[in-house]
Image: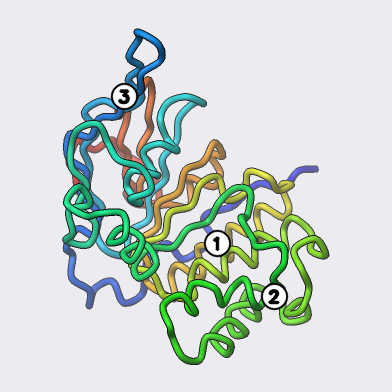
Amino acid sequence: MAHRLRPEGLPLRNPFSEEMSLKDILQVQNLGKTYRSGDQTLAVLREISFALAEGSTCAVIGPSGSGKTTLLAICAGLERPTSGTVILNGKNLGLMDENQLAQLRNREVGFIFQSFQLIPTLTALENVMVPAEIQGRNHARPRASELLEQVGLEDRFHHYPVQLSAGEQQRVALARAFINRPKILFADEPTGNLDAETSETVARLLFELNRVVGTTLVLVTHNPDLAAFTERIIQLRGGVIAADRRRSGGAFGASNTSA
């Protein structure tokens, strides 16, 4: 029997949230993205606006082709919008060049990808250390070791990706995403390549690490069970926001506000 993710057993809020500023760490204003295909213009995103407060968790859901991954890439500064504005931790991404965006991503943003994106020639420990070493941080190895222990891979430090299962590779990716204590973490289908039981393990680790570090989490998923862990669900359909629901008393209710 397939296991289902159970959000009720997981703490959803950062325990220090009352002490934190309630400022918005991500503001998306009238975002649009179009592509040219021959003499046709394809609108992938249209008039997308929302804001996320520090320490919050949000899932972006919708059918294939609804613009979820494109929205995530634009919010993370990996792709430029055709129109609109993205403000990430007080910085207007549209006013930054590629070098500035790369520095911002390494300093303040974490990523988790469906395909893990581990470097095959590096061990698990070395993969986790990469973002910290790019920053020139001291003590990258002890921090990476601690994170791998937290995700249950204390006996896999010196294994290469090819020697790890899919679930173990994603746990390495989780540890790598948190090594620089990012302000915001973007996760694109983090359980998409995993079986149901492994997905539950990875989901619990993701939200537990997120709670401990106090990171804002934005995840794209087709999995309604995974989305149910979050405090807010934004549903895209045809490149627009079709619904925006927030957790209230253990259930989700409609919301028309942007923060």
> Counting residues from the N terminus, which is met first, the one under dot 2 or under dot 1?
1
The 10 Å Cα crowd at callout 3, few under 14, some 14 to 19, many 20 or more, is some
Q: Position of residue 192 (x, y in %)?
A: 63, 43
Give the vertical position of 235 relative to 170 (above or below). above
| Three-letter amino acid code of the residue under disc 2 | Gly
Q: Which residue is mark 2?
A: 152
Q: Which residue is mark 3?
A: 34
- In the rendered image, residue 210, in percent from the top left (x then y), is placed at 45, 67
- Is the image coloured rainbow, by chain, by secondary structure, or in one colour? rainbow
Q: Secondary structure at mark 1?
A: helix
Question: Between marks 2 and 1, how big is the CA–CA gap?
Answer: 19 Å
Marks 3 and 1, the one that precedes in the sequence: 1
Q: Residue at x 30, y 36 (%)?
A: 244
Report x, y in % for residue 145.
62, 84
Q: Nearer the viewer, residue 188 or 132?
A: 132
Please report the residue visible at 55 percent of the width from the left and 69 percent of the height from the top: 176
* Residue of label 1: 9
Q: Nearer the viewer, residue 116 or 26?
A: 116
Dot 3 lies on which element? strand
